[in-house]
């Protein structure tokens, strides 16, 4: 069961919410997966997506990749609760212009989701796990990019930041409070 700790923050006509949960279990229209350029699901959350969602997801991805950093594509979510998965290739730790690339990745994820009719989407702490994007930078850039996107013309009604633990939660909580 997700733990919603902060009150929702309204940005334009949309809601931004922070929760602690397993993103692959959420009942949303779509969630974002921080993908490898070849779109192989691999291990970690990719493995969870593959096991829980079934082989149809990887089969669809095989036709959509490879992607460059900043790009995002949408696949069906197989047997998962979500209808879609947005596979976004973001920057890795110590890449040049990590902030700009992360901002582009977040914006392209939201745009790709909206193109398939997504109204409710969940994003993880983009790149903060295996790829080593510093959490403070991740929280600042991700939430700023979400706010900027939602201030434009959009049909997205809710953006959920879904983190896995208190270590990820804290910087997002502080940054989300500043969006008001």
Image: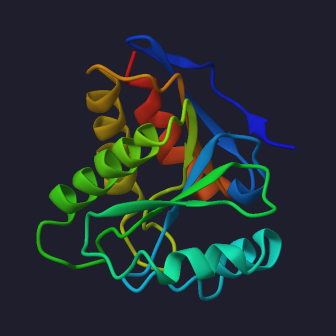
Taking the spot 72% from the left edge, 59% from the top edge, the residue there is 24
- Which colour assignment does the render follow? rainbow
Question: Measured from the top left, where is residue 140 in percent x and y?
Answer: 32, 44
Q: Determine the image quadrant of residue 36.
A: bottom left
Q: Is residue 82 above or below residue 50?
A: above
Taking the spot 40% from the left edge, 41% from the top edge, the residue there is 115
Question: Measured from the top left, where is residue 114 in percent x and y?
Answer: 43, 37
Question: Measured from the top left, where is residue 132 in percent x and y?
Answer: 40, 76
Q: Please state which of residues 31 and 63 is positioned toward the viewer in this rendering.
A: 63
> Does residue 106 appear left or right of residue 26 in this picture?
left
> Does residue 149 appear left or right of residue 81 in this picture?
left
> Does residue 22 appear left or right of residue 17 in this picture?
right
Question: Measured from the top left, where is residue 75 in percent x and y?
Answer: 55, 62
Q: Determine the image quadrant of residue 110.
A: top left
Q: Determine the image quadrant of residue 146.
A: top left
Q: Residue furthest right?
A: 1
Taking the spot 23% from the left edge, 53% from the top edge, the residue there is 104
Image quadrant holding the C terminus, namely top left
């Amino acid at each position: 069961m997700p733990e919603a700790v902060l009150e929702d923050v309204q940005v334009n006509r949309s809601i931004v919410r922070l929760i602690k949960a397993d993103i692959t279990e959420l009942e949303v229209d779509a969630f974002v997966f921080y993908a490898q350029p070849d779109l192989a699901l691999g291990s970690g959350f990719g493995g969870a997506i593959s096991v829980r969602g079934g082989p149809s997801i990887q089969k669809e991805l095989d036709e959509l990749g490879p992607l460059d950093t900043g790009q995002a594509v949408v696949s069906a979510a197989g047997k998962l609760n979500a209808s879609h998965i947005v596979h976004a290739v973001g920057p890795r730790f110590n890449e040049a212009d990590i902030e700009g690339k992360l901002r582009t990745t977040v914006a392209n994820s939201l745009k790709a989701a909206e193109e398939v009719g997504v109204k409710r989407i969940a994003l993880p702490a983009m790149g903060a796990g295996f790829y080593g994007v510093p959490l403070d930078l991740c929280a600042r850039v991700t939430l700023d990019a979400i706010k900027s996107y939602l201030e434009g013309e959009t049909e997205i009604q809710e953006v959920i930041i879904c983190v896995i633990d208190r270590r990820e939660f804290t910087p997002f909580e502080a940054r989300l409070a500043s969006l008001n």
